[in-house]
Image (cartoon, helix red, strand yellow):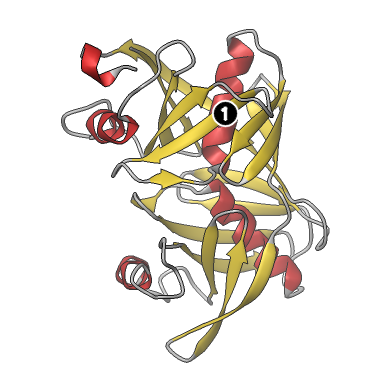
Amino acid sequence: MRLTKMHGARNDFIVTDARSQPLADAASFARRVCDRRAGVGADGLILLEPSSIADVRMRIINADGSEAEMCGNGVRCAARWLDEAGEGDCIAFETGAGVVRTEVRERVPEYLVRVGMGRPRVSPFTVDDKAEAFVDLGNPHVVFVCAHLEAVELEPLARRLQNDPQFPSGTNVHVAVVENAGTISVRHWERGVGLTQACGTGAVASAAVAIQRSLAGSPVEVLVPGGRLIVEWDGNGEAYLTGPAVRVFDTQVKVGDAALR
C-alpha cells in the first residue's frame, strides 16, 4: 500500500488513497503504521474514500485505532495530497463533522491551505469549580484560558476528563494564553493520541473562546508547539483555519490480502 507521511504544524499523519486500496480493518492498520518505534510513525492515519455527497470522504483514524470526527490539520494535508495528485485546489470533504471545504491559498514559499471549519458553538463548562469553556466543532473541545501555558497540568487533567460522564466519547483538551488582541498560544491534548504539536480544531476552538470573551479579535494568530496557524471568525458564522501542509516522504508497506477488502 502506498503511503505519504505529511504534517500540519508538526501534527503528523499518514495519508493513503483507500479509493483504490480499501482496508478491511482500518483500526489495526492505523495502530501498526502510526507506531513510532515499529511503524512509519504518526498521530493518525488519513483514509481517502469515495463519497456520494462531496468530492471525497476523509476518515481520521487516531494512533490508538479510534476514529475522530474531523481534523483541521489533517484535512489540509489531504487537500495538498489531492491537489498534487491533480484533483484540484478546491476540495469538498465528507467528514464525521459534515462537509468541509478547503482551498489551496499558496504553494510557495510554503504550502498554505484554508479550511472552512463550520460554526463554533461555545458554552460554559465547569471543572474543579472553575468556569472554563466547551466548544463543539463537530468534535468536542474543553478550553482552559490561563495566565500561562503551564498553569494547568494538561495531560493528567485531560486523561481524567476522558472518564467524565459529560463526554461519553471523550474530549480534546486545550490550554490557551492570550498574548495580545491578535495572538494566542495554545497547548493541545487530543483524544486517541495524547499531547500533540498542534490541533487544528483545537486552535479554532481556543480562538473562538478568546474572540467570544472579547480577549482577541479576528484574525487570530495561534501559536502552537509545532508552528503557527491563523483563525478567522466573526463570532457568528463559519470559522476558517489557514495553515501549512508539509509533504515529508512517500513510502510503501506490505499489507496482507486479508487486510484489504
Q: Specify the farthest residue to the top.
A: 86
The residue indicated by pointer 1 is 57
Taking 150 as reference, is 232 above or below it?
above
- Percent from the top left, x then y, of residue 62? 37, 42
- Which residue is at 28% across, 31% downward? 41
Displayed quadrant of residue 95:
top right
- Percent from the top left, x then y, of residue 32? 22, 30
- Which residue is at 56% across, 47% downward? 200
- Percent from the top left, x then y, of residue 98? 65, 43
Q: Specify the farthest residue to the left.
A: 38
- Which residue is at 31% across, 33% downward? 30
Does residue 31 appear in the picture of this structure? yes
Disc 1 on helix, strand or loop?
strand
- Percent from the top left, x then y, of residue 170? 41, 62
The three-letter code of the residue at mark 1 reads Arg
Taking 163 as reference, is 228 above or below it?
above
Taking 242 as reference, is 176 above or below it?
below
Report the quarter where the C terminus lies: top left
- Mark 1 crowd level (few <14, some 14–19, many ≥20, 10 Å Cα): many
In the figure, is residue 159 to the left or right of 254?
Answer: right
Does residue 11 appear in the picture of this structure? no
Report the quarter where the N terminus lies: top left
In the figure, is residue 10 to the left or right of 140?
Answer: left
In the figure, is residue 237 to the left or right of 69?
Answer: right
- Which residue is at 64% across, 21% downward? 109
In depth, the one of 67 and 41 nearer the eye is 67
